[in-house]
Image: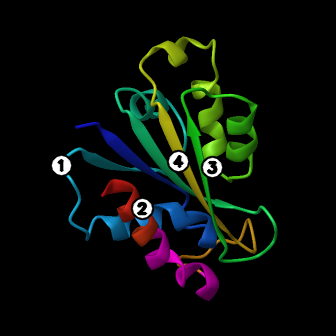
Amino acid sequence: MKKIRIIGCGNLLAHDEGVGVHVVRRLQNEILPENVEIQEMRTPGKQLTELLTGTEKIIIIDACTEQNNTGTVHRHVLKESADEKLQEKLFQTLHAYNLYPFLKPGTKTSSLGLPREIVIICIEIEERHRFCVGLSQKVFAVVDDVVAMIMKELY
């Protein structure tokens, strides 16, 4: 059974920017297969290498400001190689873009057994740099939809 890691990105104190963490915390209430591991990534750092290695599939959930349509969910799938498409998709997120240097071909970490499949789920938010706890109504309204989307990825 392939190992799957789900990474929720965000800052819970920064309003909608914390949506990835809210989603993975909600996922912890679900019955997940034994091969699934959930991680929160509040601030990127040394743990990135550990989060990326040793899995066959990674699902990244993060906030984005792609088309200014708050609450819209985008799903991107990249397989086998980290190319410019990956960079483009990761740069649309607010926090997951920090993963690109670790996934980029030719880097030391790219030879450490990185995932063959990367799924990026980004939820559009309206306002960046707003500091308060909780999610806006439009973003909160799609959390269950994102959880359902992830559950389909797993089963």
Question: Pointer 1: what residue?
Answer: 34
Q: Residue at the spot x=34%, y=43% of the render? A: 4
Across and down, in percent, residue 73 comes to: 62, 68
Spatial CA span between label 2 and label 1: 15 Å
Q: Which of marks 1 and 4 precedes in the sequence?
A: 1
**Label 1: element kind:** loop
Q: Residue at x 63, y 12 (%)?
A: 106
Residue matched to label 4: 119
Q: Residues within 10 Å of mark 3 (few under 14, many from 20)?
A: many
Does the magenta stretch mainly form a helix, a strand or a loop? helix
Residue bearing mark 2 = 150
Q: Check disc 3 and report its element: helix, strand or loop.
A: loop
Magenta-drawn stretch contains 141: yes
Outermost residue, right side? 67
x and y percentages locating residue 2 in the rendered image: 28, 36
Secondary element at tag 2:
helix
Give the residue at mark 3.
Answer: 95
x, y percentage for residue 22? Answer: 45, 68
Q: Nearer the viewer, mark 3 or mark 1?
A: 1
Q: Earlier in the sequence, mark 3 or mark 1?
A: 1
Is 21 one of the magenta-colored residues?
Answer: no
Q: Secondary structure at mark 4?
A: strand
Q: What segment is highlighted magenta in the picture?
A: 136-146
Q: Nearer the viewer, residue 128 or 55?
A: 55
Mark positioned earlier in the residue sequence (2 or 1): 1
Measuring 54% from the left and 28% from the top, which residue is drawn there?
80
Q: Give the Cα separation between the discs numbered 2 and 3.
A: 19 Å
Q: Are marks 2 and 3 in contact (CB under 8 Å)?
A: no
